[in-house]
Image: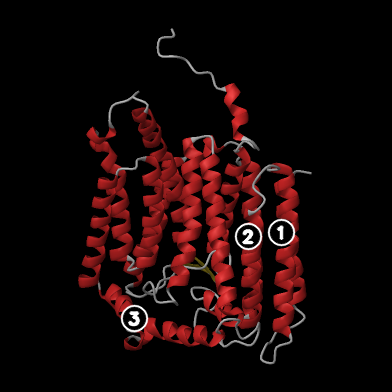
Amino acid sequence: MNNQRIVELTLLLLAAFITLATVAVAAVAEGANIEWAAIPYLSALLLMWGISHLSLRKWAPTANGLLFPITALLQGLGVAFVLRIDPDLLTRHLVWSLFATVAFIAVLIGLRDLGQLRKLQTPLGLTGLVCISIPVLLKIIRGEVNSYPSVQLGSVAIEPSHMGTLCLVIFFAGWLASYRSRNTAEYLGEADRLDGDPSRFIPLIGAWLLISVVVIFQSNLSAAFVLVAIFLSMWWVAVGRPIDLAFFVAAVVGSVLLAIDNVPEFQDRFDAWTDPWSNSQFGEAISRSSFALAGGGLTGTGPGEGSADWVSGATDQFAFVPIAEELGFMGGAAVLSSYLLLAGVGLRVATAARKEFESLLAIGIAIFFGSQAWAAIAVPLRFLPPNDLSLPFVTSNGPALFTCSIALALLLRISETVPVIPDRTQILPRIAFKSQGAP
């Protein structure tokens, strides 16, 4: 058996133990309402983890062994708190987890060559633009300024913005890969300087316009922050022109200032950020989160003993609050460290990737996980204004889980294509150097 799969199986068993232990401790708490019906659900969740592990063993045997257990642990903790706070979400969460697992396996089986994905970068880019624009169109059609950016299909609410962001990550990776190749050729003296080519501003202008739409028409500064973090990271690796990035950041700041002065919804969110007591719609959840986080202290109140169900959105936008309250500062720091480890492993995969597209795609996905997690955690800590972002893999938001599972499968597929070289000096004898005078 491959060492990566042994590590993965061991960590999966640890994640399963932590999940079951958290549920068991919460079940015996005085105020908890966890019934025996939770056992089949937990069994189904562990079964899906096992199937995903077997799929990796068969179709991606050399993929990184840390990525999937980290996300499984986060999902398990999220499930444990959903069981306690709102058991009525169990069935819907189980269905979305099943869809996410099917999509995860489908990517592993169907995407054997990442070059196929690059050929679809233009359609995926257009799809991403459409998905990002749907919330804007919904607000215009509904005529409600503060309407939730989701499409209601019966009893199921689908948020297209998560999938739109992932599609844009793929598009940016394919678009910027050529700039990175040209940048490398310029460094080797094989191409003209990129500074003299005005086409390098096209991606910057396009990204600025997209972010401006999110800020001005969606009034979502956190979603704009995620897009800025993803694009800046990928652009810096691909091109690395500090002056260009300075102009880009200045343009984004200008869009934010314009929204603060002229967009009422953005002003409401900004006021709720600076003074939560002044805005009951956006500020109430932030104020209650502050009390809940303060009650957690260093070690927490213990699973099942918290009051986070008093906070609206405790299973979605404010999912970090019950974790930090019941597990304390140490538990919250452990969750944050898990996201840092997830992003760090993704960036390490990017540095070892053999192709420009794969490297940039891995960077984009890693920053996608890290920035979205930080943005969701930053709201209850009052580092960012209120937003509609969900904590990746932890929340009960089904569309977010579905998108993150696809992104995880892509990252694992990239890591599977990375050559395993214990000692990198082993590749030196394979490199043939030619002197400048050689024919």
Identify the residue at horizontal 65%, vertical 84% (top origin).
302
Q: Please name the residue that numbered disc 1 is placed on.
A: 11
Left or right of residue 95: residue 180: left
Q: Secondary structure at mark 1?
A: helix
Q: Secondary structure at mark 3?
A: helix
Identify the residue at horizontal 66%, vertical 91% (top origin).
31
Task: Identify whether 207 is placed above or below 141.
Answer: above
Task: Identify whether 408 is placed above or below 221.
Answer: above
Q: Residues within 10 Å of mark 1 (few under 14, many from 20)?
A: some
Q: Nearer the viewer, residue 311 or 154?
A: 311
Query: At label 2, which amino acid type do we have?
Result: Ile
Colouring convention used in this rendered image of the protein:
secondary structure
The quadrant in which residue 165 appears is bottom left
Q: Is tag 1's residue or tag 3's residue first in the polypeptide sequence? A: 1
The quadrant in which residue 267 appears is bottom left
Query: At label 1, which amino acid type do we have?
Result: Leu
Contact check, label 2 and label 1, Cβ < 8 Å = yes
Distance between the alpha carbons at the discs numbered 2 and 1: 8 Å
Q: Please name the residue that numbered disc 2 is placed on.
A: 70
Q: Is tag 2's residue or tag 1's residue first in the polypeptide sequence? A: 1
Q: Nearer the viewer, residue 159 or 183?
A: 183
Q: Is residue 119 visible?
A: no
The furthest residue to the right? 1
Q: Which numbered marker is on residue 272?
A: 3
Q: Secondary structure at mark 2?
A: helix
Contact check, label 2 and label 3, Cβ < 8 Å = no
Task: Identify whether 224 is placed above or below 293.
Answer: above
Left or right of residue 246: residue 183: right
Identify the residue at horizontal 58%, vertical 75% (top origin).
330
Q: Nearer the viewer, residue 99 or 345?
A: 345
Distance between the alpha carbons at the discs numbered 2 and 3: 33 Å
